[in-house]
Image (cartoon, grey):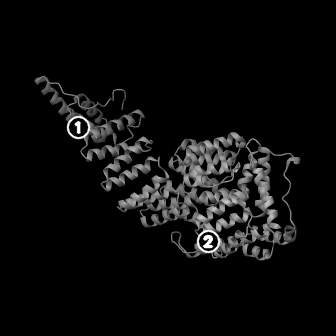
């Protein structure tokens, strides 16, 4: 009887969830209902997410507020035990809460009973991890309650007695036991049983590895699915599609949502559009000045821009709000890293990991700090932990590639850089790193492809063409090398970076000699003159000018004209 009532409840939410975004009043009602359901079950993160969305919508008049959830006979019988257990649960006395829920028959009490046992096991596991292991030791500490929970939930699942919330918990247990395929199926079932529970969607998101897997899933067709798809696009580095999806959600009526603003800011951070991301994070802090969530990502942007005063202000501000939050520790770690105090930075990232051993950003950033301290073995362990938390973290794969590069192990480099490239196919840094690995392994054709691809997708660091030119030069492919140097110099001159870029002189030196050998003395002379603008190439430029002058004198005496063989470098419209 209880199970059938739960099915009716879920069906009501399911029917109501099949709405267009035009009906914002109904969406608001659904959010209010699911907030209440999640609160009763201690699912605080889902409550927060739904509450932020509800706050972004206009308030409802009293007569429009949704009715309270259906109250069954079992709920009435379990009410006192549930109230007592929930008070213990809120105080994180999970074993005590579970003890008083034994024998309860309602779905709500059963979920809280199982959830209390799960969280008790997680708390003991985390305590043991912190007490007995160093931050980089791989320990075999497990949640001892998982196997028992799986057996019990599996029987209920086979009998069709699990509601949307308990299906979600069953999926979490399966994921923790590394039964990932079964976990995906159960989470999909949970989203169908209760589409408005964001926690189930988020867990599913962590298990989807690529776009093909996403397309293969049979997901409920409701408005919350659009938020999930946008989140998945961001995770899969499909940033253009993610931004389009979030823009459509804003236009649908969620323009005041701080959640959407934060997700768009993270998306811009992922494609290294730093100005846009910084502007959005500053806007977010104006709207929600005591927000800590995502501030570690904001600090990464400030770090990349070397904005010390702003990063210092952010760190002090967050310490004033909550010094024992993971994000606060990461921000302070970034601040010390920017000041080149890498030991202190690593200490704060370790502190973050004591607070949350599954904090992806802290593992990756700690790996970077160990790299700075030349502690490659510790860096490798940190990056491996990051990958265990999230296999889609390209920064950890890329960090492992860099570490093995320092250790002069190019085959390992190639493997890890390939993984990073698969996750970020249009990131020039991954392609350049791949090209360098291929070059070290004397796979020159592959190296050339990588460097050229890096240039065509938009070379962030403007190094791909230079490396391609040097490879051609090394292989005595002088015409190809010259063409690459020509495009490289024209790119640098056109964006006004030539005086800041140390390698321009290298390109000019090569082209001067190249044109001289091909008897294109005008172009050779122009390159030699430009060489004189750079300290490291000045003497060679002067020497080449003397050679050209001697050849011209000789040509005038013999009255001969050189033959053009290649397209000249046109620098007439640019000034150094």
Q: Which residue is mark 2?
A: 126
Badge 2: residue crowd in 10 Å (few <14, some 14–19, many ≥20): some
Is residue 141 at least partly visible in the picture? Answer: yes
Element carrying mark 1: helix
With 517 as the anchor, is 106 left or right in this view?
right
Element carrying mark 2: helix
Can you give x and y, in whole percent of width and height, for residue 39 in the image?
77, 61
* Precedes in sequence: disc 2 or disc 1: 2
With 39 as the anchor, is 414 left or right in this view?
left
Can you give x and y, in whole percent of width and height, for residue 464 in the image?
38, 45
Quadrant of residue 41 in the image?
bottom right
Quadrant of residue 533 in the image?
top left
- The residue depicted at 81 percent of the width and 45 percent of the height is 59
Can you give x and y, in whole percent of width and height, for residue 415 in the image?
41, 59
- The residue depicted at 55 percent of the width and 58 percent of the height is 361
Quadrant of residue 440 in the image?
bottom left
Can you give x and y, in whole percent of width and height, for residue 303 in the image?
52, 50
Q: Residue furthest front?
A: 159
Q: Which residue is mark 1?
A: 513
The image quadrant where one finds the N terminus is: bottom right
């Amino acid at each position: 009887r209880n199970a059938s009532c739960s099915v009716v409840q879920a069906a009501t939410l399911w029917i109501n969830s099949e709405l267009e975004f035009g009906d914002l009043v109904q969406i608001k009602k659904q959010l209010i209902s699911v907030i209440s359901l999640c609160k009763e079950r201690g699912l605080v993160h889902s409550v927060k997410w739904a509450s932020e969305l509800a706050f972004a919508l206009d308030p409802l008049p009293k007569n429009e507020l949704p009715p309270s959830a259906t109250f069954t006979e079992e709920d009435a019988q379990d009410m006192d035990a549930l109230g007592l257990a929930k008070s213990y649960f809120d105080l994180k006395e999970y074993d005590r809460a579970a003890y008083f829920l034994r024998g309860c028959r309602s779905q709500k009490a059963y979920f809280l009973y199982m959830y209390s046992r799960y969280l008790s096991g997680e708390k003991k596991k985390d305590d043991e991890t912190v007490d007995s292991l160093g931050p980089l030791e791989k320990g075999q500490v497990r949640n001892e309650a998982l196997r028992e929970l799986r057996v019990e939930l599996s029987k209920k699942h086979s009998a069709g007695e699990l509601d949307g919330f308990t299906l979600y918990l069953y999926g979490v247990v399966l994921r923790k036991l590394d039964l990932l395929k079964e976990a995906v199926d159960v989470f999909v079932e949970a989203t169908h049983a209760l589409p408005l529970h964001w926690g189930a969607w988020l867990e599913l998101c962590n298990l989807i590895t690529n776009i093909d897997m996403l397309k293969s899933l049979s997901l409920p067709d409701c408005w919350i699915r659009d938020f999930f798809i946008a989140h998945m696009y961001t995770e899969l580095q499909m940033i253009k599609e993610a931004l389009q999806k979030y823009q459509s959600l804003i236009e649908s009526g969620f323009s005041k949502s701080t959640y959407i603003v934060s997700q768009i800011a993270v998306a811009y951070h992922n494609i290294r559009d730093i100005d846009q991301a910084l502007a959005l994070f500053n806007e977010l802090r104006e709207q929600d000045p005591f927000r800590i969530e995502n501030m570690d990502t904001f600090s990464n942007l400030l770090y990349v821009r070397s904005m010390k005063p702003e990063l210092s202000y952010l760190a002090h501000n967050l310490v004033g709000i909550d010094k024992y939050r993971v994000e606060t520790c990461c921000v302070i770690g970034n601040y010390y890293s920017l000041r080149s105090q890498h030991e202190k930075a690593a200490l704060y990232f370790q502190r973050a990991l004591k607070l949350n051993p599954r904090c992806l950003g802290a593992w990756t950033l700690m790996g970077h700090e160990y790299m700075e301290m030349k502690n490659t073995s510790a860096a490798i362990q940190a990056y491996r932990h990051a990958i265990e938390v999230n296999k889609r973290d390209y920064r950890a794969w890329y960090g492992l590639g860099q570490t093995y590069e320092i250790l002069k192990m190019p085959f390992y480099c190639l493997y890890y850089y390939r993984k990073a490239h698969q996750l970020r196919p249009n990131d020039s840094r991954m392609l350049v790193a791949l090209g360098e690995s291929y070059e070290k392994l004397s796979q020159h054709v592959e190296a050339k492809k990588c460097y050229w691809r890096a240039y065509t997708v938009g070379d962030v660091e403007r190094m791909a063409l230079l490396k391609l030119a040097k490879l051609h030069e090394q292989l005595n492919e002088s015409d190809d090398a010259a063409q690459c140097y020509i495009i490289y110099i024209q790119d640098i001159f056109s964006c006004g970076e030539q005086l800041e870029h140390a390698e321009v002189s290298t390109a000019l030196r090569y082209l001067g000699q190249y044109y001289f050998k091909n008897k294109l003395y005008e172009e050779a002379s122009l390159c030699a003159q430009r060489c004189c603008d750079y300290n490291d190439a000045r003497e060679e430029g002067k020497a080449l000018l003397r050679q050209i002058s001697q050849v011209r004198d000789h040509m005038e005496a013999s009255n001969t004209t050189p033959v053009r063989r290649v397209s000249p470098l046109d620098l007439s419209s640019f000034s150094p």
